[in-house]
Image (spheres, coloured by chain):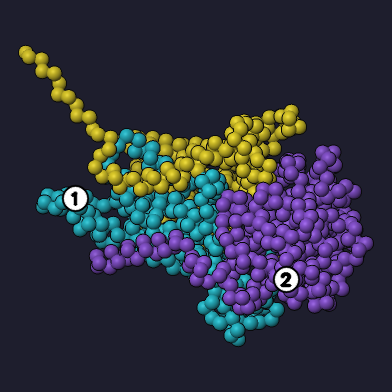
Amino acid sequence: MTSASPPPIPRRPLLRPGMGKLAPGFFLFLCLFLAPVLIVVVYSLLTRGTYGGVVWHLDLDSYARVLGLPNEDELRDWDFVYLGIFAKSAMIAAATAGLTLLMAFPAAWYIARQPDRRKFMLLTLVTLPFFVNALVRVYAWMLILRADGLINNLLMASGLIDQPLHLIYTPGAVVVAMVYQYLPFMVLPLFASLEKMDLRLLEASRDLGASGSTTFRRVVLPLAMPGIVAGMVLVFVPAFGNFLAPTLIGGAKDLQLGPLLAQAFLSARDWPFGSAIATLLSAVVLLCLFVMARSEGRQAKEVV
Amino acid sequence: MRRLRHLAAASLTAMAIAAGLPSAPASAAQELHLYNWTIYIDPAVVDDFQKESGIKVTLDNYGTNEEMLAKVQAGADGYDIVFPSVFMQDIMSQLNLLGNPGLKDLDGYNNLDQKYFIAKSDPQHEICLPYNWGTTGLIYNKALTKGQAVDSWKVIFEPPEALRGKIAVLDDVRETIGAALVYNGFSFNSTDPKELAKARDTIAKAKPYWAAMLTDGIGDKVINGDFAVAQWWSGSAAQTVASKPDAVGYVIPKEGANGFQEQMCMLAKAPNVASAKAFFSYMMRPDVAAKNTNWLHGGTTNKAALTMVNPALRSDPNLYPSDEVRQRLHLVQDLGDKIRLYDAVWTKIKAE
Amino acid sequence: MSLRPSPLKAALLAHLWLFFLFLYLPIAMLVVYSFNDNAVSMMTWNGFTFDWYWRVLANIGLISPSSDLAGSGNLQLYSDPNLGPAALNSVIVALGSASLATVIGTLSALGLARCTFPGKLTYRTALYLPIVIPDIVLGIALLVFLAALSFPLGRVSVILAHTVFLASYVTVVVGARLAGMNTALEEASADLGASPWITFWRVTFPQLVPGIVGGFLLSVVISFDDLVIAYFTSGVGATTLPVYLFGAIKRNVSPEINAISVLMMLLSMVIVALALWLRRPTRA
């Protein structure tokens, strides 16, 4: 009955063989991504220099301004204009994500049901336009939506209207341009989810007497959810901070986050303020990524 | 197969390294690095300079004064010459970003018309060369504006029924707010909060009737009818009018307008000072100045060049306004810290 | 294979056609109108011409500017000799940053696949950040960072900036390939007494090559197409093609832009098609 003490659990060393491979990537990430982002966060807490740059003097006023709080010294009253810009950008980004989802889902479903070779070819065709320069793609949509553009020309030629429609320089135009830009970001994750789906579950549901729409609601949607969430995040986040579409095709009448950020750094030369906006934007991005990671994790656990 | 892959990897890495290497040492051939607005210097003028002097010239572009300032401040070393607007020259002088090429001692200095030396920070007229001037007025589609008065800012800020929804305004803080200030009878550079508030209200009332606020590709949209009237710069407008004179026209509004002027300045950190000075002398030659002005459809600051400027341009009162009209032109001045008042107004306008 | 009723299948097919129409209409339009012989009113069809392409090629320097093909009418206004250097810069930046990113990204993918350590999931998710973060935030952050360090802006700064997010793309692509790989061969090789180094070069790497090359080509295209980050981090002599195009569009929309766009498009598509063809599912 000698009580042998349990063998000591070997402590696994933190640095294991093979981790050297991660070093270059890690340093790149640290020096050229993390450090710049952290500097921006730090700058957001400082005071602006008259002609750009910052003065090393702690000042939370930038955040106060974004949130709409008044400031006696700056002769500023309650003003929620910036929160309004955040909200508007979020709405347009959400509309973009929603519309993209509606367009991509049936297409992804169809492609997932094809034989391998055709699947691959179709995916290639879907992804190809993505690699055309974003500027060029927005420009192409400008050519379509102008007063003398394709749509108006067709409608007028067929006699349906006699005055050109005002399509360009509207929020709708911005949404369309962004949907076009981010469509592959929605199709690919959806496809990945739908491809993995076990069709037998659908058959079983049908055999048990469920209607098509019930099957869709209670079997397909939950199984496709990780793909849907991933797609929505991958579209919403870049759309939220998009700079090109609002600037070129949105008419710049209504300010969105991307142009506001550029404006703060360039024409307003208010680096701390711009940094505050960038920091808040990044916080939203992190939040969305977190949601996406959680959803994937949860799905992985549910699959038994 | 493996050897091929090794070779590929090696050559790619070599290319990556080569890309980072600085260009050929200056001792080999002389160089000059220009940083200018997009399409704002006659390529032939640059080419001729290269041929004559043997100096290799590179040209990078920027879209706004602020962009150029941000880049120069952030460390875009290597540029020799930049082209700031007058107020930007004042700002850059304050920030000690400009170098002194000693204009007075260079050939051709006497060709310049002294009345164009207006930068507050350069009373001795020796730091920057006045490059080009123009006005910000209205370009209009003749057919769509038939019977309407287009020689006033009223067409922008209180548009008649027929033109609503077909108006474009510049997406520029100073230009647009300045126009509203001038329309209300105030100074283009006003920093009075009450006057700015009035300007803001004027713009807010008019904005629903505007199609867009932009600085790009305005010309062809006025021609094709997307816009009936647009606020634009005289040089660009003149180029468009020249291409279709019976369809479009340009006018300076009677209440007054921005009379802008760009300068050619050498940076304090310019690496090729001798080349820069040579370029300054070159640009002060009357034949060169005239050639450039004709291409820009702009205003020359070189009195010796006036005779060589295209007579069609010279006689256009909207491009070379009379002294009486000149009185009503304002120059954008640096506002220092007060620019924040404008930013607040601007964001308010854009966000509503 | 599918038990869907016919009307649903027909609807799906119809949707797919409309979907591809939506995707390719703008592209088709650009191509068609790049041949429009109308300098002033771009959307009014005036006739077929190769003029714009000749002008672009002349500006890049591939054909002589004085040749008959390139000169037509008062188009001197729109020609800009900066097109050539900008195109060259784009190529150099793309190749440089793609090379660096491929090496770094592949190493990261290997490290992530083969090791476990605390915080691995967090690190893996963090590596997605450079891809997902809006490019304007990254561009501005890099500008601020480089300014704070007094690092000169030029071609190198753009290459470094691009490498940051391209490495993440490569990590994802190669990682996916690694995940799908059969480790049996590697185990067999180890069982036969081969050292880890030899196992890697003789067994793992050959299977990985399509993924690596695919990642490289993907990086080239993405770098070539980037506007915003290059806009903020470029310096002397480093103007890339998209930055140049952005400025040109802002000044005066010239039909040459259509031709440039189409040529860029062709280049991108050829490279991507090549990359995807290399990654196609094979019987292995």
In x, y percent, where is residue B58?
Answer: 58, 67
Front-most of residues C178 and C96: C96
Q: Name the residue: 54% across, 40% down.
A: A40
Q: Which mark is residue C131?
A: none
Q: Name the residue: 51% across, 46% down.
A: C149
> The residue tagged with tag 1: helix, strand or loop?
helix
Hey, which residue is sitting farthest front in the picture?
B105
User: According to the rendering, which colour does chain C have?
Assistant: cyan
Instruction: Report the residue marked by disc 1.
Output: C196
Hey, which residue is sitting farthest top in the picture?
A1
Instruction: Report the residue marked by disc 2.
Output: B107
In the displayed structure, C36 sits above or below B192; it is below
Within 10 Å of the Cα at label 2, are there few (<14), some (14-19), or many (20+) other Cα atoms? Answer: some
Hey, which residue is sitting farthest bottom in the picture?
C68
Is residue A105 in view? no
CA–CA distance in space, label 1 to label 2: 72 Å
In the displayed structure, A12 sits above or below A156; it is above
> The residue tagged with tag 2: helix, strand or loop?
loop
Is residue B287 in view? yes
Left or right of residue C158: residue B10: left
Front-most of residues B305 and B173: B305
Chain identifier of the residue bearing label 1 in the image: C
Residue under disc 1 on the same chain as residue under disc 2: no
Judging by colour alone, the chain drawn in purple in this rendered image is B
Q: Name the residue: 65% across, 32% down.
A: A61
Chain identifier of the residue bearing label 2 in the image: B
Amino acid on which the number 1 mark rests in the picture: Pro
Marks 1 and 2 close (CB-CB < 8 Å): no
Amino acid on which the number 2 mark rests in the picture: Asp
Judging by colour alone, the chain drawn in yellow in this rendered image is A
